[in-house]
Amino acid sequence: MIKKILIANRGEIALRIIRACKELGIPTVAVYSSADSLSLHVRFADEAVCIGPANSQNSYLKQSQIISAAEVTNADAIHPGYGFLAENPDFVQMCEDNEILFIGPSPDVIKRMGDKAEARATMMKAGVPVIPGSEDVIHSVKDVKKVAEHIGYPVILKAVAGGGGRGMRIVREPDQLQDAFSTAREEARTAFGNPALYMERLIEQARHIEVQIIGDNYGNIACLGERECSIQRRHQKLIEESPSPAVNENLREKLGKIAIKAAKAVGYSSAGTVEFLMDKNRNIYFMEMNTRIQVEHTVTEMVVGLDLLKEQINLANEHHLPKWLKKFKLRGHSIECRINAEDPYKNFRPSPGKIVAFHAPGGPGTRMDTHVYAGYEIPSNYDSLLGKLITHGSDRAEAIARMERALEETIIEGVSTTIPFHKAILKDPSFRSGDLHIDFLEDFKFQ
Amino acid sequence: MRASKILELVKILEAHNISEIEISRWGQKIRITKNENRGDIAGTTVTATEAVRKSIQHQFVEVAGIAEDHTAVADENKDGGVEIKSPIVGTFYLAPAPDAEPYVNIGDHISIGQPLCIIEAMKIMNVIESEVAGKLLKMLVDNAQPVEYNQTLFIIDPAG
């Protein structure tokens, strides 16, 4: 029985976890850097421990400080949220060594899925369709040439230690290979400490379709429907929705079977996401697996009617997967807009500063997950996510109408936000007709 | 909560430079706010949070320096002394062993590099050494109490 949970994160997700803990009656411990002393997650938690200075390396990423904080507060479980240490197998191991329960899958699963090349290999062995590409790490330009000739151009080089859209290079012509290979290796080395690359065929106009899965500690896995996350800017998701307008019941069933097969192949437990790319012909290919709760878990919660964070905690507490999750129907449609403190009129330049006025929207089917408030000073040391605006409707049209109305109502003054950008996307006829693909924003004209 | 206790809290509010006190204990919660010109919201919040945490919750003390790369974090204190703050989260110990003499006592003259205390974190005993020389004015943490990053442990008067 978990007695106290320490949240090893900050911002909106820390608040989200605290909310789930409160509802379950589990006391919470927040950790924070000196830049976050006035953050909401610190105020809402039952206890709070300052763990370091502003920079993440010495605070939110400092494993020893976080374990120490759990020790001095007698927290027996840690929820890592997303980002930071959520997919760091060394941290999970450290938790285990200190007899602290890590709310997530085992370090072995995290490690295997964290190495993107190994994940591909594991999936191929399990019979999960993967994007045509290299069998393993590519070691030389000669290798790259050989694979590229086999799978066809254009290709994309990716860092094995990367993920989340970072460390990638597209190559359209053979004469670009040499340069792309060396620069991609250098970037990977700098960004992830590991220069190793793998490669895949570039699927043009692909749609990003991901499946939420959840498993207990007894080998039972359930699939909670798919999300479409094709609206991305520089590989960062901006708008997500569930279900995908491109997925019908048959395809949904197929996706679910494949996702569960992928999860069982690695002995998955807790919440996770299997990401796929879907081509123009509705062929689906495994891309990567995220062994954590994700930012966009919210839209799944809305259409399934499940509190994913509470469920994650219950499963970590040795509960069995609820039987009803084996067979249910998605209800309605949900959309999420990630609101960032960036200026869309100035090439999305970050806009830290003080929020002088704040009003969250309300009304039916409207949800705002945010850690900001009037008077809050946004620190410049962390990501620019201000909050997530989520709507739910009986169908996609209603979810869109609600989102447009909610965006109108939202007041955030004192900093620039991406709200005008979201409004423009929602008006776009291609978006409204569900005609999406991951290059959508490349061709999108704003202002 | 008894009326006499509430009155006590109100008196504390009035007597000190605090605008708000919030106490949460055994499922009961009370918040008392001083009705004055709130001014800067951020400033008010900081005051409330610090006041509550320091006077009501734990006896956290600052820690100075650790075994790793840390140097004792010393800050100017408005009373003229230098605040020695903790660079890590852990448990504060006044002495090197349970039955040993404390490293320092109030009134001692401290030299640079002198061990002040131990902060235990993840089974490692980190000896905290002083970055300043002077007279030890205050010890702000009790033995075996938890401490957090940047918490004030000692106040040393460099002129003393």
Image (tube, coloured by chain):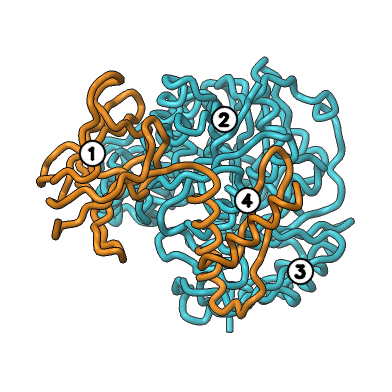
Chain colours: A cyan, B orange
| Disc 4 to disc 1, C-alpha distance | 38 Å
Callout 1 and callout 3 share a chain: no
* Quadrant of the rendering where the N terminus of chain A is positioned: top right
Q: Which residue is mark 2?
A: A104
Callout 2 and callout 4 share a chain: yes
Callout 4 and callout 1 share a chain: no
* Horizontal and vertical percent position of residue A239: 64, 60
| Disc 1 to disc 3, C-alpha distance | 57 Å
| Neighbours of disc 3 within 10 Å: few (<14), some (14-19), many (20+) | some
The amino acid beneath tag 2 is Gly
Number of the front mark, 1 or 3? 1
Q: Residue furthest bottom?
A: A447
- Residue shown at 76%/69% (left/top)? A361
Q: Which residue is mark 3?
A: A361
Mark positioned earlier in the residue sequence (2 or 4): 4
Image quadrant where residue B119 sits: top left
Callout 1: SS: loop
The amino acid beneath tag 3 is Pro
Image quadrant where residue A437 sits: bottom right
Callout 4: SS: helix
Badge 1 sits on which subunit? Answer: B
Q: Which residue is mark 4?
A: A44
Badge 2 sits on which subunit? Answer: A
